[in-house]
Amino acid sequence: MKKSALMIIIAGLMAFASCKKDEPTEIPETQQTSVMDYLPLTPGNYWVYEQNYYDSSGNVLNQTWGNDTIVVISDTMVNSLTYHRIVEHNFIGFARVDTSFYRDSSDCIVNKKGNIIFRLTPNSIFTYYPEMDTLLYFIDYSLAAQSSAITVPAGTFDCLDFQGSLYRHEDNYSVPYLFHNHYCENIGLVKKTRLFLANLDRIEFNLISYHVQ
């Protein structure tokens, strides 16, 4: 968050009669943080991530996927609302380009289906339910109260932790599996984790390079 320090300037001017004149106090405007500061979706912005694959015990697994790239392509109208069109290349080696549509909705960034992608409200839990006939899992998301320093190939960043708890049908929805998504102000998503539902293997995406306007 960008905050200006409160400045009080009092200038004393001495007149012939030794009278003092006070200048009015100046209070600069403060800028309020927006979710778009943590996921800047200006067309032309992009982020490149290395993909690291681990089993459920944390052992490194071999993969040949290369780097994952996310690019903001353009703004577009969907049902009279303005969305930012995002394309992702090479997610876990998929040749097909994945396209998403995000927009700013109050203190949230949501996708075209209304699912919350990121939220600034701390200690507020919301639940994601997948669109399927049988509920195989759901995820509780919340924003951690404290920021943390996250180190990736692109550097070290002070990040908010937008964490998820995965609950699976096979565990009778009673065992939470925690994963993290780290966002940095004016940078975007620095590090994210994805879990495989069947075996709880995970992929970590670490920021290598980026371009943010």
Image (tube, helix red, strand yellow):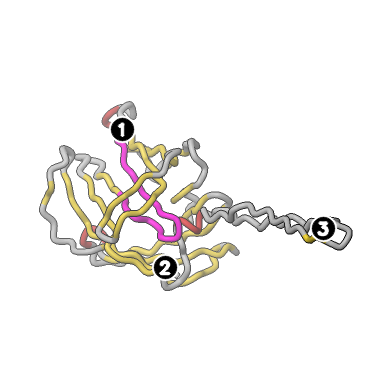
Magenta span: predominant SS is: strand
Measure the alpha-carbon separation of dots 2 and 3.
47 Å
Q: What SS does tag 2 mark?
A: loop
Local crowd size for mark 1, using a 10 Å CA cut-off: few (<14), some (14–19), many (≥20):
some
Residue 49 or residue 102, whichever sits in front: 49
The residue at which mark 1 appears reads as 169
Q: In the drawing, does residue 40 fall left or right of residue 211? A: right
Q: Distance between the residues labelled 2 and 1?
A: 40 Å
- Residue 126 visible: yes
Vertical arrangement, residue 65 with respect to residue 58, above or below: below
Q: Which of marks 2 and 1 is nearer the N terminus?
A: 1
**Vertically, is 2 above or below 170?**
below
Q: Mark 3 or mark 1, which is nearer to you? A: 3
Q: Mark 3 points at which residue?
A: 21
Measured in 3D between alpha carbons, the distance from the residue under mark 3 to the one under mark 1, in whole angstroms, is 74 Å
Dot 3 or dot 1: first in sequence order is 3
Q: Position of residue 27 (x, y in %)?
A: 69, 55
Q: What stretch is highlighted in magenta?
A: 176-192
Q: Which residue, given by chain and number where applicable, does mark 2 sit on?
A: 212
